[in-house]
Image (cartoon, grey):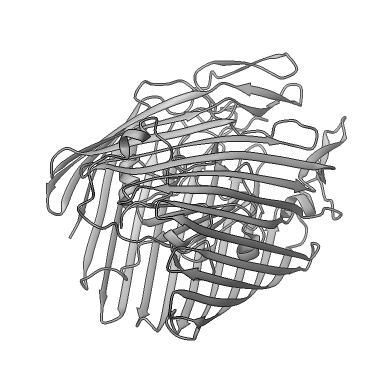
């Protein structure tokens, strides 16, 4: 599958690209699954969406999902140390728990309500990633204020033979070792994929080893660094997909299990007082099926999924929790206008979700039931014009019921220019710990209201006549009411609770994304994001850089040998630093940094490739999140194949 047309950003040499060599082949269409209730061609989509495939992962020197996501427009990253430690993303300035994460059709946002942790999620079994930006609660419910990250794993459905083996083994700096293998195939409608992978590293210290000095907004000096111990990481995964697909009916069973151990450093007890680590085990089961297709009047889909999480933290503040999430949903598509220049359809959806949470901090198990119904109208024309209107009503057992809506449209002004825009509302329900409290020092607040946002975007997509070059320029804006923060209730005992902040937080920004095929052997991408995110008191929201940019070149030197270079820039930003000695927090000004990564691969044979990633080429010393360490120069070498 080729790279998408709206993935990356404007190059300074854009005028010269307009006269680049003409394409000798037709670019294959790209299907988007997250933007609408039904799959659509990306050329018809009105939403801002980036699609990354396995080829993009290789061209961007990505080993983990977070490596790939960091190269996408409007993705601000946060990490509490090296590989495997807690890693989150702030999409279009939204909080890290304001993005819905979907893996194989299952919403995997944790029951705790916090943002999905990408720290240990490997790309070894990932087929493609979609990043959908903007208010998406009308289709995806709570957790989709900033957008959706839609991940699809390898299934075997699109293999052209009954038996296929894919493997990838590698080793690198800090004692890193990883390996994965996938058995998959397809025959007469039946398909399967059996996958297993393991990753481990001695790691770096979660707290920074190098010394960094900052100036807080109040003028005080802050020094971090000096850590010594290594914080290990180990994760094992296994999954099985079995299915039958006959184009107008199908069924699939999915089972997946992961287990990981992550070492970290505890600010309350210091770096070495305890061997702090968290052990997490996740089990996912899903049964889904469909009847009908997009060429028929009716298409029905239904699925039932169950996620079980068992997490134990061993530290000075030891804790544990068990969480379960049961989800059942049904969708009816009515394709009442399937032929001609204009196609129209309506989808109706119903969803039931029950979440249970049992923690060492609670005397009884907490539960939450959410029921919702939604509908979406879609219109697409042969000229790439489109219109969609959607709405969702959410009935919650604990939180206030809510209605969200969205309208999105695109209009092809000329063969080379398309205008697109969207406007929507979204909600974010309080987390379990915000609503029920956590312990005697973090109190419950049953009066909390869901966060609400109103936002939209407008942009223009410019494409060359041969579709080998594209530039997408998009302005986006969001107003958030009832933003949830925390307040100190008792200074002596430092007791606090979650509260809704008065006033409106405002987020504004611009995305510029370029993607191009400079020649038949040279591909390029680049993107730039300008972001201003402020709360109701006009204070900058933490961990949202004002400027971010990414760029890369992939060069196929010979039929067997290819190289790539990727550059990432993260601008100045504000972070929050907690002083364990004074029990106070301060806002810290973080400097910008630039990273350069190199990659190369050589095809030893038709089925075997050796590759290498040289990351942080200039050994940049930096902290992305105040107090926490990041890799200096490091290397990873691997061997992958397919038979």
Image point (36%, 79%), residue name: 245
Q: Name the quarter where the C terminus is drawn.
A: bottom left
Can residue 615 be spotted in the picture? Answer: no
Image point (36%, 25%), residue name: 633
Q: Name the quarter where the N terminus is drawn.
A: bottom left
Image point (60%, 45%), residue name: 313
Residue 233, compared with residue 333, is above or below; it is: above
Residue 238, compared with residue 568, is above or below; it is: below
Q: Position of residue 629 (x, y in %)?
A: 51, 27
Quarter of the image where one finds residue 164: bottom left
| Count of numbered labels shown in the rendering | 0
Q: Position of residue 614 (x, y in %)?
A: 31, 31
Residue furthest left as drawn: 605
Quarter of the image where one finds residue 484: top right
**Viewer-closest of 203 and 431:** 431
Residue 165, compared with residue 529, is above or below; it is: below
**Viewer-closest of 280 and 367:** 367
Q: Position of residue 68 (x, y in %)?
A: 42, 44
Q: Position of residue 43 (x, y in %)?
A: 42, 59
Can residue 129 be spotted in the picture? Answer: yes
**Viewer-closest of 552 and 112:** 552
């Amino acid at each position: 599958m080729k790279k998408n047309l709206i993935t990356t950003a404007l190059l300074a040499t854009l005028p010269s690209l307009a006269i680049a060599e003409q394409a000798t082949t037709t670019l294959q269409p790209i299907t988007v699954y997250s933007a609408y209730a039904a799959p659509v061609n990306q050329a018809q989509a009105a939403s801002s969406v980036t699609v990354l495939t396995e080829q993009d992962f290789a061209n961007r020197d990505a080993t983990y999902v977070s490596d790939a996501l960091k190269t996408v427009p409007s993705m601000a990253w946060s990490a509490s140390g090296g590989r495997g430690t807690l890693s989150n993303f702030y999409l279009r300035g939204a909080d890290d728990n304001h993005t819905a994460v979907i893996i194989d059709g299952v919403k995997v946002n944790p029951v705790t309500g916090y943002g999905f942790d990408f720290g240990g999620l490997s790309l070894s079994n990932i087929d493609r990633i979609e990043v959908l930006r903007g208010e998406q609660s009308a289709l995806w419910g709570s957790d989709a204020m900033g957008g959706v990250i839609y991940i699809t794993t390898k299934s075997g459905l699109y293999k052209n033979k009954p038996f296929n083996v894919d493997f990838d083994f590698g080793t690198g700096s800090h004692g890193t070792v990883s390996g994965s293998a996938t058995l998959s195939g397809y025959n007469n409608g039946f398909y399967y994929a059996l996958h297993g992978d393991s990753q481990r590293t001695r790691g770096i210290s979660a707290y920074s080893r190098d010394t960094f000095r900052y100036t807080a907004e109040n003028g005080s000096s802050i020094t971090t660094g000096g850590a010594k111990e290594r914080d290990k990481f180990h994760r094992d995964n296994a999954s099985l997909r079995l299915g039958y697909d006959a184009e107008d009916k199908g069924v699939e069973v999915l089972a997946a299990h992961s287990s990981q151990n992550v070492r970290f450093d505890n600010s309350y007890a210091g770096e070495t007082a305890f061997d702090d680590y968290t052990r997490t085990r996740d089990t996912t089961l899903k049964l889904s099926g469909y009847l009908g297709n997009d060429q028929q009047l009716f298409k029905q889909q239904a699925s039932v999924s169950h996620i079980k999480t068992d997490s134990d933290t061993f530290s000075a503040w030891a804790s544990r929790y068990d969480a379960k999430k049961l989800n059942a949903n049904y969708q009816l598509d009515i394709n009442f206008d399937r032929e001609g220049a204009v196609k129209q359809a309506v989808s109706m959806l119903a969803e039931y979700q029950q979440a249970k949470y049992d923690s060492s901090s609670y005397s009884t198990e907490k539960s939450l039931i959410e029921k919702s119904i939604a509908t979406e109208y879609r219109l697409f024309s042969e000229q790439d014009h489109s219109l969609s209107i959607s709405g969702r009503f959410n009935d919650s057992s604990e939180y206030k019921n809510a209605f969200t809506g969205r309208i999105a449209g695109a209009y092809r002004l000329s063969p080379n220019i398309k205008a697109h825009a969207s406007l929507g509302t979204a909600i974010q329900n309080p987390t379990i710990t915000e609503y029920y409290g956590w312990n005697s020092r973090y109190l419950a607040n049953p009066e909390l209201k869901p966060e609400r946002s109103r936002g939209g975007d407008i942009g223009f997509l410019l494409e060359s006549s041969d579709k080998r070059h594209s530039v997408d320029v998009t302005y986006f804006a969001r107003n958030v009411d009832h933003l949830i923060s925390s307040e100190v209730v008792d200074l002596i005992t430092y007791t606090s609770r979650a509260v809704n902040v008065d006033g409106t937080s405002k987020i504004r920004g611009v995305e510029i994304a370029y993607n191009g095929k400079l020649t038949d052997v040279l591909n390029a991408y680049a993107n730039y994001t300008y972001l201003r995110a402020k709360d109701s008191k006009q204070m900058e929201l933490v961990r949202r850089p004002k400027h971010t940019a990414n760029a890369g070149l992939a060069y196929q030197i010979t039929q067997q040998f290819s190289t790539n270079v990727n550059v990432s820039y993260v601008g100045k930003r504000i972070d929050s630093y907690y002083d364990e000695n004074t029990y106070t927090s301060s806002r810290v000004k973080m400097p910008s940094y630039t990273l350069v990564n190199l990659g190369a691969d050589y095809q030893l044979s038709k089925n075997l490739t050796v590759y290498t990633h040289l990351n942080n080429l200039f050994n940049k010393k930096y902290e992305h999140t105040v107090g926490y360490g990041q890799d200096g120069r490091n290397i990873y070498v691997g061997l992958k194949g397919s038979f």
